[in-house]
Amino acid sequence: MVRATYTDKKNAIAIITETFDANPSVNSVIGTGGNRRKKISNLASYAFIKALNRNGTFISTNKMGIALCFHSDNQSSSFKELMYELRFAISIPVKKVFETLKREAYIKKHRFKGNHLYFWFFGVKKGGDRAGFELKNYMFDYSKKVQLPLVLETSVQRNKEVYERYNFYVYHEWIDAVGGKTLWFMRRDIE
């Protein structure tokens, strides 16, 4: 596991785009029309740049897995990040922009308020071998080292169950009125 840099952007975006194509939360944001892959790619680009600005991009040694995880109190931003956010916003319908802003406001309001590591994205390409375990182990060790819990949201039942096996627990549950999908707010305390 190494910290990803800007030179890893293309590969990271490909991993995120591939692994989040069927994600209900992503689909509620991008909608069903138009070029879905391009929309997901724009979202992945924005997420990668945002995490990179916050020193929160990690890539497996075999370059087949990516994790975006950063300190909640790191609010650094950049013009480049804003440009990627705008590029994503203009790729989705105006109605979706407003729905997404409302959804993000709800999530922010209910997200764990204490200092934490925000585990935003985690994805591994098919055939990624042990990349997922490498990244998971690093994130858990890093959480312990900096003495901060890991916090995430997921709308995928299977992912929720996997996270629960690794001592994450649900601290808030919400049914998104727009997509009708459940979003689980999860936390893993320091072990």
Image (cartoon, rainbow, N blue to C red):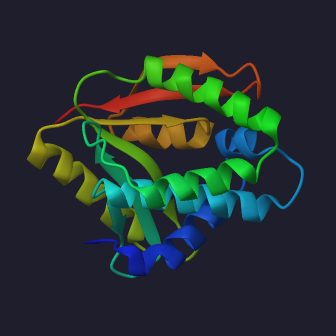
Q: How many marks?
A: 0
Indicate the quadrant where residue 28 lies: top right
Q: Is the residue 61 above or below the residue 3 in the image?
A: below
Q: Is the residue 5 above or below the residue 90 in the image?
A: below
Residue 42 horizontal/vertical position (percent): 64, 60
Residue at 17%, 35% in the rendered image: 190
Residue 96 horizontal/vertical position (percent): 77, 36
User: Would residue 180 be found to the left or right of residue 112 on screen?
Assistant: right
Q: Quadrant of the N terminus?
A: bottom left
Residue 17 horizontal/vertical position (percent): 63, 64
The residue furthest front is: 79
Residue at 36%, 73% in the rendered image: 60
Of 84 and 166, the residue lying toward us: 84
Q: Quadrant of the C terminus?
A: top left
Residue at 42%, 54% in the rendered image: 50
The residue furthest right is: 33
Q: Is the residue 36 above or below the residue 106 in the image?
A: below
Of 166 and 186, the residue lying toward us: 186
User: Would residue 107 be found to the left or right of residue 68 on screen?
Assistant: right
Residue at 59%, 72% in the rendered image: 14
Residue 156 horizontal/vertical position (percent): 61, 39
Q: Is the residue 162 above or below the residue 82 in the image?
A: above
Residue 125 visible in the current orientation: no
Residue 152 visible in the current orientation: yes
